[in-house]
C-alpha cells in the first residue's frame, strides 16, 4: 500500500469521515484500474461489483426516475461510486460511463463487505451521514413546498410567443430583448396598452442565465399600501421578495402603484434593499437585501421610478409596425385554427389593406381579438373578406365611401390613357388656342363673341359649382399647365443635357401663397378697371399671362411648380376645394407596410398593377395629404400604385377643416380677398345704393373706390372677431371679479367655467368658417351670367363669325328664377357657414354669436347688391 493513497483518501474523498484505521484497511485491498473513454463502469439495476474511487479522469452518471426522465451528473476525481449500494446491499441506481480515460481505485464487493463487518463504524458513520442528508432534504423540500404555494398565484411558467414580424421595429425590439437578457439590470418596459409587455418581460427572463429561477408577475394596483405582501413582516410571514430569491419580479403597471409604496419601490430599485413591515412603529427597522431582478412595466411615465431604472425598452405601437400586420394576422389565424381543430383560413388582400389602414389603439390584443372574431363570423368560409373586419376603421375613414369600389368602370376610366392625357392633348390643348385666337380677332362684346361668353358665362359658374363636388378637378385639365408641360418637354428635347431645377420648398411654402395673393389682387383690379367681362382681347391677355407664367416656371423647375405655389387660379381652386365632398387619398397603413418604391410620388417604371408614370405633378403623397389643396385629381397616383392603396372617397364636405386642417396666413389673406371680390364685382350697384357720385370713368377715383371696396369686408371681419374677443375678456373679467369676492355660486360658477374654458380660437383658424359664404356669394354673382347668358351660346357663336343667329334656340332663365336661385344659394351658404364655424371652434353657440351675426350681415349685404338688383 502506498502511504500517498491513505493521505489522498483523507483529503480528496467523502471517505475522510472514517478513521485512519478504516481507511488504511481499504487502501490495503484497493486495486488500481484504468477504464478507457466511453466504456461503462456501472450499469443501472445491477448488483455492484466493487467500490470505485475516481483518481483521475471524468465520469458521467445517469439516473432514470419514475417519469422516465434522465438526470445526468458529472463525476470528478475524488468521487466514490457504489458506496451507498454496498452498505445497504441494494442494486446500483445509476449508470456510470467514462467520458475520458479514467484511473480508479477498486475494492471488490466481497473484500469491502469483510471490512464493513470488521469495522462497524463504517455502517454507523454512513447511516448517520445519510440521516443528516435526509433531514436536510426534508427541510429543503418543505421550504420549496411553502415557496411554491406562496409564488403559485403570481408564477409565470412560459413565454406566450416571440416577437413576430420583420419590420425594423420588430428587429430592434428583439435586439433590445437579447441585450437585456445578458445583464442583470432592472428594466423599464414602456408602451401603450395591449402590446403584451408582460410577455416581453418573460422573454427577457427565459433568455437569461437565470432562466431556471422562478419569474412572478405582480399587478401593482393589487398590492397592499403597506407593501407587506411584497416585503413581508418582521417576525411573521415572508414576503414575495424573500420567497423569490434570485428569480425575476415583474411589476405590472407601475403607474398604478399606491402612492405610499413608490418610495419603497424606488429604494428597492436603487439599492436592492428593503425593510419588512413592522406592526409596531417603535420597533427598529430591519434591512434586507434582495437578489431578485426587477422588470417594471408601465403605460405612463413615473419619474420617481424611472430615475432608478437601469435600462428602458420602449415597445413600438402597432400603428408604426404596419409591415408586421400580415405576419401577425397569419400567426393569429394559425393559433386559433389549430386550437379549434379548423382548416386554416387566409385573408383577402382587401381585408389586409383595411387592417393596415387602421391605427389599432388596442394594439396586439385588439388585432388578435379582431382576427378571432372574424374567424368565428366567417363560419365555414376559407377566406376572411374585408366585410368581416367591419370595425377596423380609422377616424379618418369614418363617413367615407370609396367610389372606385362601387363603380369599377370609373376606376378603369381614370386609369386609362383617356384621363387626362388624351383629353388634355387631344382636345384642351387645341381648343384653348382656338379660344384665345377668337378672343383676339373676334368681336369684343360678350353678346357677340362666343369665346368671351364661354369664359364668363360658362367657365366661372361651372367651376364654382364644381368645387363642392370634385374639388380641383379643373386643374387636371387646365390648359395653363398643359402648355407648361409642353414647354417642359420641348426644353428638354432642345437641351438634352439640361436638368430642371428641384423645388426650393421652404421659401416656396413661405412666399408662394403671398405671390399668388398679389397676382389675384391685380387680376381683380384689372377686371374691374378695364371691364374684362366685356372686352375680349383683354380677357385673352389675362389667359395668356397666366399661361406664360406656367410656361416660364415649367421651363425652369420640374413638374408643376407654378400650379402648386404661384398660380392665382390654382390658389383659389385649392382654397375652395377644401369644401369638397370628394377626396383622393391613399391608405397610410398599406403604403407604410407594403410600398418601398413610392411610385405614386416619385414615379417609375411599371410594377405589377402600377403603371409607368412620372410621379405626382404637385409632389404630393396621397397618404400624407392634410386637405384637398394640393391634389388636382390627375389620378397619377391611382395609375402608379401597385397595391390598390389609392381611394377616391365620398366624405362629409370640408371635414378636414375641423379635424386635421392646418391654417396658413396667406390662405386667410386670399380668402378675405375673394370676399372683397364679390363686392367689387358689384361696384356700380354699391355706388348707387350708397348714393355716391364718383366718376368711374376716371382711373384714380375708380382705383381708390375699388381698393376701398376690397378692404371694407376684410375690415368688417376683423371688427367682428375683435368684438368677440372683447366680449370674452369682459365676461372673463366679471367672472374673475366674482371669484375674488367669493360670490361664484351656481350661475356665476358656470359662467366662469364657460368663459375661461372657451377662449376664442385664433383668427387664422376661425376665419375659415366664412368659406361656404364666400363660395356661395361668388356663385350667386355668376349665376346671373350662367342662367341669363350661357343659354345664348348658339346665336352668339353665329354672331362671332358674322352670321345671323336669328331663330336659333335660346335657353335662359326668367329673372325671377335667377333671383330665387341666387337667394337660395346665399341662405344655404349662411347656414353652412354657421355649421362650419361651430365645427371649427367647438364652442357654445352663444359664444360665437358675433361671428354668426357677422355672417348674416355679410350675406344680407351680398343679397342687397346681387339679388335685389
Image: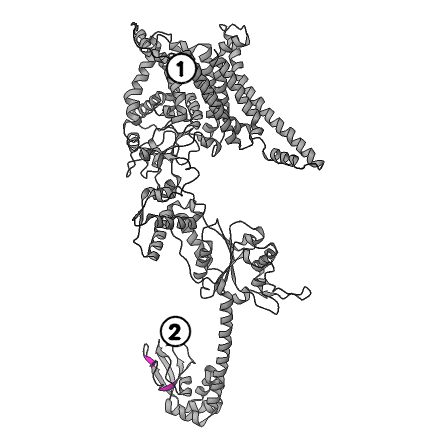
Residue 665 showing in the rendered view: no
- Residue depicted at x 47% and y 66%: 213
Could you tell which of marks 2 and 1 lies nearer the N-terminus?
2
Residue 210 showing in the rendered view: yes
Q: How is the image coloured?
A: one colour
Q: Is residue 443 left or right of residue 775?
A: left
Image quadrant where residue 598 sits: top left
Range shown magenta: 35-51
Magenta stretch contains residue 39 = yes
Judged from the image, the secondary structure of the residue bearing numbered disc 2 is strand
Counting other residues with Cα less than 10 Å from the Cα at mark 1, is it few (<14), some (14-19), or many (20 or more)?
A: some
Residue 400 percent location from the top left of the image: 40, 35
Residue 524 percent location from the top left of the image: 46, 15
Image quadrant where residue 390 sits: top left
Q: Main secondary structure of the magenta part?
A: loop
| Residue labelled with disc 2 | 71
| Residue labelled with disc 1 | 542
Q: Is residue 366 left or right of residue 730?
A: left
Counting other residues with Cα less than 10 Å from the Cα at mark 2, is it few (<14), some (14-19), or many (20 or more)?
A: few
The residue furthest right is: 741
- Residue depicted at x 34% and y 36%: 599
Residue 732 percent location from the top left of the image: 64, 32
Residue 171 percent location from the top left of the image: 40, 51
Image quadrant where residue 731 sits: top right
Amino acid at each position: 500500500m502506498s502511504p500517498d493513497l491513505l493521505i489522498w483518501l483523507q483529503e480528496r474523498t467523502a471517505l475522510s469521515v472514517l478513521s485512519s484505521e478504516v481507511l488504511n484497511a481499504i487502501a490495503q485491498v484497493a486495486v488500481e484500474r484504468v477504464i478507457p473513454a466511453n466504456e461503462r463502469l456501472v450499469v443501472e439495476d445491477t448488483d455492484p461489483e466493487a467500490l470505485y474511487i475516481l483518481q483521475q479522469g471524468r465520469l458521467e452518471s445517469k439516473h432514470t426516475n419514475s417519469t422516465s426522465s434522465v438526470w445526468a451528473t458529472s463525476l470528478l476525481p475524488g468521487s466514490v461510486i457504489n458506496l451507498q449500494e454496498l452498505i445497504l446491499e441494494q442494486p446500483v441506481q445509476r449508470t456510470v460511463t467514462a467520458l475520458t480515460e479514467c484511473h480508479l481505485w477498486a475494492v471488490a464487493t466481497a473484500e469491502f463487505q469483510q471490512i464493513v463487518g470488521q469495522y462497524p463504524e463504517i455502517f454507523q458513520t454512513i447511516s448517520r451521514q445519510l440521516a443528516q442528508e435526509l433531514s436536510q432534504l426534508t427541510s429543503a423540500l418543505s421550504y420549496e413546498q411553502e415557496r411554491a404555494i406562496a409564488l403559485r398565484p403570481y408564477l409565470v411558467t412560459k413565454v406566450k410567443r416571440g416577437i413576430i414580424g420583420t419590420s425594423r421595429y420588430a428587429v430592434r425590439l428583439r435586439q433590445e430583448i437579447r441585450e437585456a437578457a445578458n445583464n442583470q439590470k432592472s428594466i423599464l418596459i414602456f408602451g401603450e396598452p395591449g402590446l403584451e409587455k408582460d410577455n416581453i418581460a418573460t422573454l427577457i427572463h427565459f433568455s437569461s442565465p437565470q432562466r431556471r429561477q422562478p419569474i412572478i408577475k405582480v399587478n401593482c394596483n393589487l398590492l397592499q399600501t403597506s407593501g407587506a405582501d411584497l416585503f413581508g413582516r418582521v417576525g411573521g410571514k415572508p414576503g414575495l421578495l424573500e420567497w423569490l430569491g434570485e428569480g425575476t419580479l415583474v411589476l405590472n403597471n407601475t403607474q398604478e402603484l399606491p402612492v405610499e409604496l413608490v418610495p419603497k419601490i424606488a429604494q428597492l430599485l436603487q439599492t436592492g434593499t428593503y425593510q419588512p413591515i413592522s406592526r409596531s412603529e417603535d420597533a427598529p427597522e430591519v434591512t434586507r437585501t434582495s437578489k431578485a431582478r426587477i422588470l417594471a412595466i408601465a403605460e405612463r411615465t413615473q419619474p420617481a421610478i424611472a430615475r432608478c431604472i437601469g435600462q428602458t425598452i420602449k415597445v413600438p405601437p402597432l400603428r408604426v409596425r404596419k409591415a408586421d400586420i400580415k405576419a401577425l394576422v397569419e400567426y393569429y389565424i394559425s393559433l386559433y385554427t389549430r386550437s379549434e381543430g379548423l382548416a386554416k383560413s387566409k385573408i383577402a388582400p382587401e381585408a389586409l389593406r383595411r387592417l393596415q389602414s387602421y391605427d389599432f389603439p388596442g394594439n396586439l390584443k385588439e388585432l388578435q381579438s379582431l382576427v378571432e372574431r372574424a374567424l368565428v363570423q366567417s363560419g365555414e368560409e376559407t377566406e376572411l373578406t374585408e366585410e368581416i373586419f367591419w370595425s377596423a376603421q380609422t377616424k379618418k375613414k369614418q363617413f367615407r365611401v370609396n367610389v372606385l369600389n362601387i363603380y369599377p368602370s370609373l376606376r378603369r376610366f381614370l386609369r386609362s390613357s383617356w384621363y387626362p392625357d388624351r383629353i388634355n392633348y387631344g382636345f384642351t390643348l387645341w381648343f384653348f388656342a382656338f379660344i384665345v385666337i377668337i378672343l383676339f380677332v373676334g368681336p369684343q362684346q360678350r353678346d357677340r363673341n362666343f369665346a368671351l361668353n364661354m369664359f364668363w358665362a360658362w367657365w366661372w359658374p361651372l367651376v364654382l359649382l364644381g368645387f363642392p363636388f370634385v374639388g380641383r378637378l379643373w386643374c387636371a385639365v387646365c390648359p395653363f399647365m398643359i402648355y407648361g408641360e409642353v414647354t417642359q418637354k420641348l426644353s428638354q428635347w432642345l437641351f438634352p443635357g439640361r436638368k430642371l431645377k428641384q423645388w426650393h420648398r421652404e421659401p416656396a411654402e413661405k412666399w408662394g401663397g403671398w405671390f399668388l395673393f398679389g397676382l389675384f389682387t391685380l387680376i381683380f383690379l384689372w377686371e374691374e378697371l378695364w371691364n374684362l367681362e366685356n372686352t375680349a382681347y383683354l380677357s385673352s391677355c389675362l389667359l395668356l399671362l397666366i399661361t406664360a407664367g406656367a410656361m416660364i416656371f415649367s421651363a425652369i423647375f420640374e413638374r408643376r411648380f407654378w400650379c402648386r405655389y404661384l398660380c392665382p387660379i390654382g390658389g383659389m381652386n385649392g382654397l375652395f376645394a377644401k369644401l369638397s365632398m370628394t377626396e383622393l387619398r391613399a391608405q397610410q397603413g398599406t403604403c407604410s407596410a407594403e410600398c418601398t418604391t413610392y411610385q405614386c410620388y416619385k414615379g417609375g417604371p411599371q410594377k405589377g398593377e402600377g403603371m409607368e408614370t412620372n410621379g405626382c405633378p404637385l409632389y404630393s403623397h396621397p397618404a400624407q395629404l392634410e386637405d384637398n389643396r394640393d391634389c388636382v385629381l390627375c389620378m397619377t397616383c391611382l395609375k402608379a400604385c401597385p397595391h390598390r392603396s389609392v381611394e377616391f372617397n365620398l366624405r362629409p364636405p370640408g371635414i378636414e377643416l375641423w379635424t386635421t386642417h392646418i391654417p396658413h396666413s396667406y390662405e386667410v389673406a386670399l380668402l378675405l380677398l375673394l370676399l372683397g371680390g364679390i363686392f367689387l364685382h358689384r361696384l356700380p350697384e354699391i355706388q348707387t345704393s350708397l348714393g355716391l357720385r364718383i366718376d368711374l370713368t376716371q382711373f384714380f377715383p375708380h382705383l381708390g373706390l375699388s381698393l376701398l371696396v376690397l378692404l371694407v369686408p376684410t375690415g368688417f371681419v376683423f371688427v367682428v372677431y375683435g368684438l368677440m374677443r372683447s366680449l370674452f375678456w369682459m365676461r372673463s373679467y366679471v367672472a374673475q371679479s366674482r371669484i375674488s369676492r367669493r360670490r361664484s355660486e351656481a350661475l356665476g360658477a358656470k359662467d366662469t367655467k364657460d368663459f375661461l374654458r372657451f377662449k376664442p380660437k385664433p383668427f387664422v383658424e376661425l376665419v375659415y368658417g366664412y368659406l361656404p359664404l364666400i363660395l356661395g356669394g361668388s356663385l350667386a354673382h355668376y349665376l346671373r351670367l350662367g342662367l341669363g347668358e350661357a343659354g345664348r351660346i348658339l346665336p352668339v357663336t353665329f354672331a362671332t363669325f358674322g352670321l345671323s343667329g336669328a331663330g336659333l334656340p335660346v335657353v335662359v332663365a326668367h329673372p325671377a328664377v335667377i333671383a330665387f336661385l341666387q337667394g337660395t344659394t346665399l341662405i344655404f351658404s349662411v347656414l353652412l357657414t354657421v355649421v362650419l364655424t361651430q365645427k371649427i371652434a367647438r364652442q357654445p353657440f352663444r359664444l360665437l354669436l358675433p361671428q354668426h351675426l357677422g355672417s348674416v350681415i355679410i350675406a344680407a349685404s351680398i343679397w342687397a347688391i346681387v339679388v335685389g338688383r
